[in-house]
Image (cartoon, coloured by chain):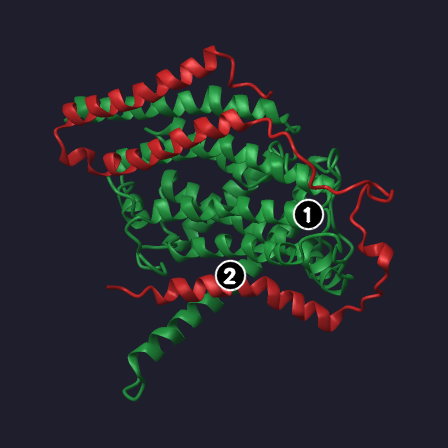
């Protein structure tokens, strides 16, 4: 593959850039599809038809119209805010969502880096989303934004521990933190069967991590105008949503990899199975969003500390006991 | 020693992609600046005071308990990975003791009614 005259470092760099471009194209396409899908799903759940008149089958060109509109919108910069922090927040929101693709496998060899501690890498990187919310809230110098950012902090304290404990149970059951190896362990039985509790805890926590209803307390448009992104408009605002849709995709893909057998499935190629499972979970996420009302922040903290955390600890103990007895 | 070139390129791309989009939008859009548009939003009135007042963080007790359990998770991951290579009964017993000590703390905080939104 590598031409004779080319230095090895240059070749590595070119490969890295090509991988980046492929992932950016995939992420952009995914965001465009999800914009349309979310509007369509919400429409049908509310007994409407959703976007229809823009063009294409079932109004699929709505996404193109949305993107053009967002690009052409005027950009307001709040003068009282902390300009640099405000300016960097969309980047800090997008970078962690994007970095997850570094370790996310789409097939046995279809992965950028087969990282040995991929599971820890993903939990570590996705936590940075909170930093971007806090930067946006603080940098705006707006009361609604600041309240939204403070709530996002409370939310992180509620979901992060149960999520980590659910992943400990996964690591215990499979004995590895490498995502490819975890999928290979599920060749005969999906992990959701023995680890149904871990799956439920992980899924509820990941909805909270994504800041989507019923846990969208940081935005809460009926209480806080738009929460942490009140002061963002046009393309900068859309970058937060780009990051959110990318996070929705990656967390659904992670749930499919950890619990639903990843790329294992009959007839179709592996990546197709993984995409089917991922988008099924994305649809479930939208279903939850348009069905359940928003919880209060103290209810969320009670849910995290007094229900999900004990459940996940019991699950770890049960998994360990099972391993002791079976051996 | 791997250099992780991909990681660095991914990180740079993740940071610059939103900024590139903002620049791209600058070519398309037309701004009509106005001092009134740049006032921070407060439901239509002129903002009263600064947003950065002394803010009561209602959840600082949770934050303290969170730190303890976050570190616990850090210790449990390596334990979970090597579990099958250890003597299972001993490894399990040790982890149960370790978790139980933290659970006692959690139950104590719960009974003391500090795990509430104050």
Residue on which disc 1 sits: A229
Residue farthest bottom in this picture: A5
Q: Could you tell me which secondary element the residue under label 2 belongs to?
A: helix
Quarter of the image containing the C terminus of chain A?
Answer: top left
The mark total stands at: 2
Q: Mark 1 packing: few (<14 Cα in 10 Å), some, or many (20+)? A: many
Chain at numbered mark 1:
A
Q: Which quadrant of the structure image shows residue A86? A: bottom right
x, y (%) of residue A204? 50, 32
Residue under the image location 39 percent in, 25 percent down: A312
Rendered position, A274 above or below A312 = below
Answer yes or no: do the residues labelled 2 and 1 have beta carbons within 8 Å? no
Q: Position of residue A114 (x, y in %)?
A: 30, 56
Say whether residue B75 is left or right of residue A237: left
Say whether residue A204 is visible.
Answer: no
Q: Which mark is residue B14?
A: 2
- Chain B: colour as depicted: red
- Above or below, A45 against A231 in this view is above
The answer for which chain carries disc 2 is B
For marks 2 and 1, give the CA distance. 19 Å
Secondary structure of the residue carrying tag 1 is helix
Near mark 2 (Cα within 10 A), the count class, few <14, some 14-19 or many ≥20, is many
Colour of chain A, in one word, is green
Between B12 and A321, which is closer to the camera in this rendering? B12
Tell me: A251 left or right of A316. Answer: right
């Amino acid at each position: 593959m590598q031409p004779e005259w080319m230095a090895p470092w240059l070749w590595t760099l070119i490969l890295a850039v090509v991988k980046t471009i492929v992932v950016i194209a995939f992420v952009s396409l995914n965001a465009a599809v999800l914009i349309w899908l979310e509007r369509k799903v919400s429409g049908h759940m509310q007994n409407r038809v959703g976007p229809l008149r823009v063009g294409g089958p079932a109004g699929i060109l709505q996404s193109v119209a949305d993107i053009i509109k967002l690009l052409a919108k005027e950009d307001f910069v709040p003068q009282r805010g902390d300009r640099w922090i405000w300016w960097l927040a969309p980047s800090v929101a997008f970078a962690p969502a994007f970095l997850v693709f570094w370790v996310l496998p789409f097939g046995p060899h279809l992965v950028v880096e087969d990282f040995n501690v991929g599971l820890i890498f993903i939990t570590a990187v996705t936590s940075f989303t909170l930093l971007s919310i806090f930067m946006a809230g603080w940098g705006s110098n707006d009361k609604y934004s600041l309240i939204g950012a403070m709530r996002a902090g409370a939310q992180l304290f509620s979901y992060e521990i149960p999520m980590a404990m659910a992943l400990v149970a996964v690591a215990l059951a499979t004995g590895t933190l490498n995502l490819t190896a975890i999928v290979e362990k599920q060749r005969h039985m999906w992990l959701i069967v023995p680890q149904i509790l871990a799956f439920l805890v992980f899924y509820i926590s990941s909805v909270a991590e994504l800041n989507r209803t019923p846990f969208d307390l940081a935005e809460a448009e009926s209480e806080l105008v738009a929460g942490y992104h009140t002061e963002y408009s046009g393309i900068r605002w859309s970058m937060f949503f780009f990051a959110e849709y990318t996070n929705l995709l990656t967390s659904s893909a992670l749930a499919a990899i950890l619990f639903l057998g990843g790329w294992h499935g009959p007839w179709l190629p592996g990546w197709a199975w993984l995409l089917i499972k991922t988008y099924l979970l994305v649809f479930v996420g939208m279903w939850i969003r348009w069905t359940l009302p928003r919880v209060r922040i103290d209810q969320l903290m009670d849910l995290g500390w007094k229900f999900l955390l004990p459940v996940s600890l019991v699950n770890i103990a049960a998994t360990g006991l099972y391993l002791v007895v079976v051996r | 020693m791997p250099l992780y070139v991909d990681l660095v390129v991914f990180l740079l791309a993740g940071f610059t992609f939103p900024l590139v989009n903002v620049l791209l939008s600058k070519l398309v859009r037309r701004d009509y600046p106005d001092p009134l548009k740049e006032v921070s939003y407060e439901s239509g009135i002129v903002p009263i005071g600064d947003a950065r007042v002394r803010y009561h963080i209602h959840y600082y007790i949770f934050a303290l308990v969170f730190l303890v359990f976050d570190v616990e998770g850090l210790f449990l991951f390596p334990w979970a990975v090597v579990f099958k290579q250890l003597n299972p009964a001993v490894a399990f017993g040790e982890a149960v003791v370790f978790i139980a000590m933290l659970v006692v703390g959690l139950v104590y905080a719960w009974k003391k009614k500090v795990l509430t939104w104050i």
